[in-house]
Image (cartoon, rainbow, N blue to C red):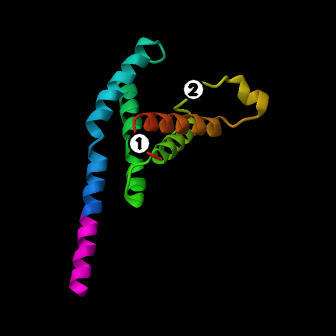
C-alpha cells in the first residue's frame, strides 16, 4: 500500500513538472512574434524608436505575463481569467512603479485631481485588460 501511495505521489509530481515545463516553454515563440509586432506598431506610431531594447522589452513583458500565470494554474489545476487579472495587475503595478509603463485610458490630470496613485490605477487597468481579453478569449472565471 505504501509503494502505491509513493507511486501516485511520483505520478502527480511528474504531471506538475510537465505542466510547468509546458507552461513556461509554450509562450516563448508567441512572445517573440508579438513582441516584434507590438514594438513595430509602437515605432510606427512615433512613441519609440525601433531598437533591440524596445523589442526585447515587449518580448519580456509578454513572456512574463504568461509565465506569472503558471504557478496559479498549477495550484488551482485549471486556467482561469482571474489568473490573467492577477498577472496583468501585478505586472502593470510593477511596470508603472519602475517607470517602464504608463497608465493607458486614464486622463493624467485625474491623478492630481482625485489624489489617485498611478501604480494602483495602472494595476486596475492592466488587470482589467487581462481579465477582459481572457474572458473574451473563452477562459472561464
x and y percentages locating residue 112 in the rendered image: 76, 28
> Which of the pair 26/52 is nearer the observer?
26
What is the quadrant of the N terminus in the image? bottom left
What residue is shown with label 1? 139
Q: Residues within 10 Å of mark 1 (few under 14, many from 20)?
A: some
> Which of the pair 110/73 is nearer the observer?
73
User: Is 14 on the left-hand or right-hand side of 68?
Assistant: left
Q: Are marks 2 and 1 in contact (CB under 8 Å)?
A: no
Which residue is at 51% across, 33% downward? 129
Comparing marks 2 and 1, which lies closer to the viewer? 1
x and y percentages locating residue 108 in the rendered image: 67, 24
Mostly what secondary structure, the magenta segment?
helix
x and y percentages locating residue 125 in the rendered image: 58, 34
Which residue is at 38% across, 28% downward? 53
Q: In the rendered image of this protein, does residue 14 appear above or below residue 124?
A: below
Label 2 element class: loop
User: Is 32 on the left-hand or right-hand side of 101?
Assistant: left
What residue is shown with label 2? 104
User: Is 99 on the left-hand or right-hand side of 70?
Assistant: right
Task: Quadrant for residue 76, please give it.
Answer: bottom left
Find out whether residue 5 is within the magenta segment: yes
x and y percentages locating residue 79 in the rendered image: 39, 49
Which residue is at 31% across, 48% downward? 24
Rounded to the nearest angstrom, the CA distance separating label 2 from label 1 is 24 Å
Q: Residues within 10 Å of mark 2 (few under 14, many from 20)?
A: few
Residue 54 visible in the snapshot: yes
Which segment is the magenta one?
Answer: 1-14
Q: In the rendered image of this protein, does residue 18 appear above or below residue 118?
A: below
The total number of labels drawn is 2
Amino acid at each position: 500500500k505504501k509503494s502505491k501511495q509513493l507511486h501516485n505521489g511520483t505520478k502527480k509530481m511528474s504531471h506538475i513538472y510537465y505542466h510547468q515545463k509546458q507552461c513556461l516553454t509554450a509562450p516563448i515563440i508567441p512572445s517573440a512574434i508579438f513582441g516584434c509586432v507590438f514594438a513595430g506598431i509602437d515605432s510606427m506610431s512615433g512613441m519609440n524608436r525601433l531598437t533591440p531594447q524596445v523589442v526585447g522589452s515587449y518580448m519580456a513583458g509578454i513572456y512574463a505575463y504568461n509565465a506569472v500565470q503558471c504557478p496559479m494554474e498549477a495550484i488551482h489545476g485549471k486556467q482561469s481569467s482571474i489568473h490573467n487579472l492577477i498577472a496583468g495587475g501585478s505586472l502593470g503595478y510593477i511596470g508603472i512603479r519602475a517607470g517602464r509603463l504608463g497608465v493607458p485610458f486614464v486622463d493624467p490630470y485625474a491623478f492630481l485631481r482625485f489624489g489617485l496613485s498611478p501604480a494602483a490605477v495602472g494595476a486596475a487597468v492592466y488587470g482589467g485588460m487581462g481579465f477582459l481579453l481572457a474572458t473574451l478569449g473563452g477562459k472561464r472565471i
